Amino acid sequence: MGAQLRQWREAVDLPSGDAARAMGWSQARFSRVERGYYRIGRDDVLALCAKIGVEDEEAVAEVARVAEEPAGKGWWASYAEKVSEAYLDFVELEAEAETIRIMHPKVIPGLVQSPRYVREMHSSARSNDPESLIALRLARQEVLSRAKFHGLIPESAFHAEFESSPGLMKDQLRKLIDASEMENVTLQILPLTAHPSVGSNGAMTILTFRHPWTPVASIDNPMGGSHTYDPAQVAYLEAEFENIASSALPVDKSRDLLNEYLEGLHQ
């Protein structure tokens, strides 16, 4: 909500200090509102949008609606004491997204991981409660029942060996094939023959939302990741995603390759 309000203010070149004075707030309070650290209610949203001059009534109503929602209302709230704040923020954003685009340079993306793959990925997690991490990742997959998903998957991920869980990769391949048959899911495989520079700069996720919410881009890291609402940064990562997608196999050839691996035909 803070990011959307900031975007509207900047669109009319209104200095933050002027907006704060118009609301009768301190500069510090206004800054915390725009950074999402201070919640404001419906009436404040309506008043601020009126002073900024936002004419999109539907958009203002949507932001005001969210302002009325109680904090920590989602299913993810029960994990608040078990995972990092950054990770929980991402889970909440992901759960509200209309489209999800994700690329990982080494592993199967979490939203299309099989339960056995999820457990293996967390078997050595630096956590006092790996079971919560496993449960959270599997719960996140429910978003595929409604959001559009475009995943870029490295072919190299199919060559991983799991001595402690034989048959895991076949189970994972079946999961991917099933997912590829969903109308809202697009899966592309980045082949081993792709130039090593393609997709080598780390995992990324790009989320878009219903009107008027600003798209968000997230970059993975060991601390749970970081995300940005900055339009220029999001646009840069969107272009990077499309560049990687252009080097990946088409959807039909990706599905064929998945079947080849499952049947043991690919050498």
Image: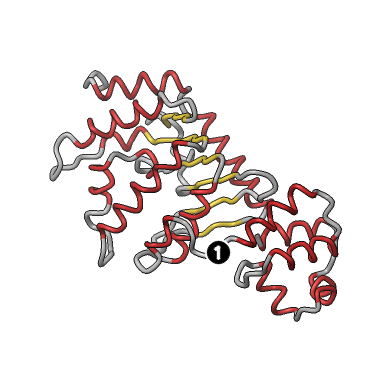
Which residue does the image show at 51% across and 38% down from the upper left? 147
Residue 76 is left or right of residue 7, and the answer is left
Query: Residue 14, how many percent across, how many down?
Result: 85, 65
Q: Secondary structure at mark 1?
A: loop
User: 239 or 64: nearer the eye?
Assistant: 64
User: 145 or 189: nearer the eye?
Assistant: 145
Q: Quadrant of the N terminus?
A: bottom right
Q: Residues within 10 Å of mark 1 (few under 14, many from 20)?
A: few
Q: Is residue 77 above or below residue 261?
A: below
**Count of labels in the image:** 1
Q: Quadrant of the C terminus?
A: top left
Which residue does the image show at 75% across and 81% down from the upper left? 26
Task: Specify the quadrant of the image occupied by residue 68.
Answer: bottom right
Residue 98 is left or right of residue 47, and the answer is left
Query: Residue 108, how many percent across, how many down?
Result: 35, 40
Q: Is residue 252 above or below residue 6?
A: above
User: 204 or 14: nearer the eye?
Assistant: 14
Task: Specify the quadrant of the image occupied by residue 196.
Answer: top left
Which residue does the image show at 64% across and 67% down from the upper left? 35
Give, as a three-letter code, the residue at label 1.
Pro
Which residue does the image show at 75% across and 47% down from the upper left? 58
Residue 114 is left or right of residue 100, and the answer is left
| Disc 1: which residue | 70
Query: Residue 78, how many percent across, how many down?
Result: 38, 62
